[in-house]
Image: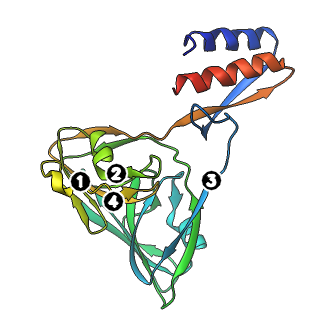
């Protein structure tokens, strides 16, 4: 791995060349380019209640309604109060209830009206990685990569984990038989996580800053900056 202080040297060199470097979040890994790629994923919502995770920037319920016109009700769990809050669509087209926005890292129950399933294409690039778990039940979205087992997910939470629920499967860290290796998570999956005390859960999002160069920056300097950022994720 290259020394971490090399990034400071590179940025100083850019400033001396009278150019600017702007930093924005973008998904990448140590092997990938630092260039941003917009990632979308389509899921199918069924009529009735659908438990989903949200990983993108916060959106209002009106913005959600524009994507899913058939929504009748949205709810989530307020972990700090250990209670559910709800927003219900009224006949006049307005929302009633304390829930106002979908926030990254949280999970929601979206009730879809009608009789037909609906495909929902949504951004799947996480904008956050740290989730604050409160004592008791928490509704959380998985922000990490696809294909992790529940046991692997649990390692990031630590010794205060009581259980993780993914669909009908319940993982209990004290019971090895519940560690089903075939039960894996995908980014955006909703999880019900119960902990015995508060935990700051840092999920492995593999998100690095994106470099945008303004002005005349030598290509070698660009390459060095990108390589150093990639090295920092290794």
Q: Which residue occupies 69% across, 20% down?
A: 225
Q: Nearer the viewer, residue 101 or 217?
A: 217
Q: Find disc 4 in the rendering and name its residue.
A: 183
Question: Are discs 1 and 2 less than 8 Å apart at CB?
Answer: yes
Q: Find disc 2 in the rendering and name its residue.
A: 149
Residue 182's quadrant in the figure? bottom left
> How far across and how far down the image is residue 128, in percent?
47, 42
Discs 2/3, front: 2
> How far across and how far down the image is residue 60, in percent?
52, 61
Q: Which residue occupies 70% across, 37% down?
A: 35
Discs 4/3, front: 4
Q: Is residue 195 above or below residue 49?
A: above
Of the image marks 2 and 4, the number of the one nearer the N terminus: 2
Of the image marks 3 and 1, the number of the one nearer the N terminus: 3
Q: Is residue 156 above or below residue 162?
A: above
Of the image marks 1 and 2, the number of the one nearer the N terminus: 2
* Mark seen at residue 39: 3
Q: Is residue 5 above or below residue 207?
A: above
Exactly how many numbered labels are in the figure?
4
Q: Find disc 1 in the rendering and name its residue.
A: 179
Mark 2 crowdedness (10 Å alpha carbons): few <14, some 14-19, many ≥20: some
Quarter of the image for the N terminus: give it. top right
Mark 1 crowdedness (10 Å alpha carbons): few <14, some 14-19, many ≥20: some
Q: Secondary structure at mark 2?
A: strand
> How far across and how far down the image is residue 173, in percent?
17, 48
Kindly report the distance in space between the C-alpha atoms of the residues bearing marks 3 and 1. 30 Å
């Amino acid at each position: 791995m290259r020394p971490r202080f090399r990034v400071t040297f590179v940025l100083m060199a850019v400033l001396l060349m009278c150019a600017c470097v702007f930093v924005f979040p973008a998904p990448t890994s140590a092997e990938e380019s630092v260039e941003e790629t917009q990632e979308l994923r389509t899921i199918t919502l069924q009529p009735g209640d659908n438990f989903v995770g949200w990983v993108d920037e916060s959106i209002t319920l009106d913005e959600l309604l524009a994507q899913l016109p058939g929504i009748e009700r949205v709810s989530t769990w307020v972990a700090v109060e250990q209670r559910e809050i709800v927003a219900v669509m009224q006949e006049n087209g307005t929302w009633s209830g304390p829930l106002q926005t979908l926030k990254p890292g949280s999970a929601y129950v979206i009730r879809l009206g009608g009789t037909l399933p609906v495909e929902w294409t949504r951004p799947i690039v996480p904008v956050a990685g740290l989730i604050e778990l409160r004592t008791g039940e928490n509704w959380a979205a998985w922000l990490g990569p696809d294909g992790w087992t529940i046991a692997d997910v649990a390692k990031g939470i630590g010794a205060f984990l009581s259980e993780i629920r993914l669909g009908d499967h319940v993982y209990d860290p004290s019971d090895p038989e519940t560690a089903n290796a075939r039960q894996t998570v995908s980014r955006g999956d909703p999880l019900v996580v119960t902990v015995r005390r508060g935990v700051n859960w840092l999920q492995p999002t593999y998100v690095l800053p994106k470099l945008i160069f303004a002005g005349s920056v030598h290509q070698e300097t660009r390459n060095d900056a990108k390589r150093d950022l990639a090295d920092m994720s290794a």
